Amino acid sequence: MATRTKVRVGVFVPSDVQLLDLACVDVFAMLSHDYLAPLEMLPSALTDLAPEVSISYVGTGPTVRTTAQTTIATTHLLGDPDVAPGKLDVVLVPGPDPSRTWGEDVKGWLRGHAEKEGVDVLCVCTGIFLLGDAGLLKGKTVCGPRGLQGKIKDRYEGVRTVGERYRWVRDGRLWSSGGVTNGNDLVVAYARETPRFFPGPVVEIVARMADIGDRPREYGTGQAVWGMGMAWQLLKAWVMGVTGVRKVKNR
């Protein structure tokens, strides 16, 4: 039997992150032989195609807080040789607070991987700001959150944003997605376009099992309609606050 393909994924969490952004790493786990092989309804002809996937959580301390009052443990610190540039195949950057600042150790670690041939960098939602602060966006086409497209362009020189239209975009070895759950679409799209790691039948079976990957890449509503919807809900909230009236459904 041929040697099983190995995929080394590093989840970069140098600060607090959004739990839903982080959750898309589970798609990588589902694509692994370890996850699929025990499932009795799947034939070995398919599960034998699945790669061996290792996942590291890389940060600056032993734990990282997420939203929803959850904490995760890191497996490696920035200086650990097992996660040095060249030791990972994929770096996944979930979204932190976009106003956060990072030291040169954090930015340098990310740059080191992005500049290493053969390493793919995937960022979800506000993870785009960490990439931008590391100097990785100049001349790149990226997504990022729909409501923060202007902020991305103002903050980083030479970046082109398409997040008002697309859920995810690829620019060379840099992949970026829009807000939060678009990270699931991003990982499935990445897997589909990376057959050296993830054979097509494995990707499609996992996408169906997880019920993801079937949303269109282009949003169903334009930026103006999306913005008006946000404004309408804010106006309704303001009116409710002023009047003290809240509609409660009868049970």
Image (tube, rainbow, N blue to C red):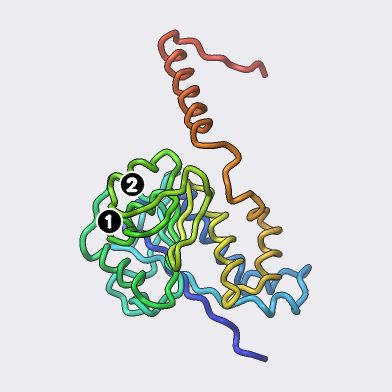
SS of the residue at dot 2?
helix
Of the pair 118 and 94, the residue shown nearer to us: 118
The residue indicated by pointer 2 is 153
Q: How many marks?
A: 2
Of the pair 123 and 216, the residue shown nearer to us: 216
Label located before the other in sequence (2 or 1): 1
Q: Is residue 75 visible?
A: yes
- Crowd band around label 1 with a 10 angstrom C-alpha radius: few (<14), some (14–19), many (20+): some
What amino acid type is highlighted by mark number 1?
Answer: Asp
What amino acid type is highlighted by mark number 2?
Answer: Lys
Give left or right: position of 46 versus 86: right
- Residue for point 44% across, 8% down: 243
Q: Quadrant of the C terminus?
A: top right
The residue indicated by pointer 1 is 133
Quarter-of-image position of residue 40: bottom right
- Crowd band around label 2 with a 10 angstrom C-alpha radius: few (<14), some (14–19), many (20+): some
> What residue occupies the far left of the structure in this picture?
104
Residue 70: x %, y % from top left = 43, 49
Give left or right: position of 111 versus 179: left
- Residue for point 28% across, 52% down: 157
> What residue occupies the far bottom of the structure in this picture?
1
Foreground: disc 2 or disc 1: 2
- Residue for point 34% across, 58% down: 137
Q: Is residue 61 visible?
A: no
Give left or right: position of 108 versus 114: left
Q: CA distance from mark 2 to mark 1?
A: 13 Å
Of the pair 78 and 75, the residue shown nearer to us: 78
Of the pair 15 and 49, the residue shown nearer to us: 49
Residue 11: x %, y % from top left = 42, 64
SS of the residue at dot 1?
helix
Q: Quadrant of the N terminus?
A: bottom right
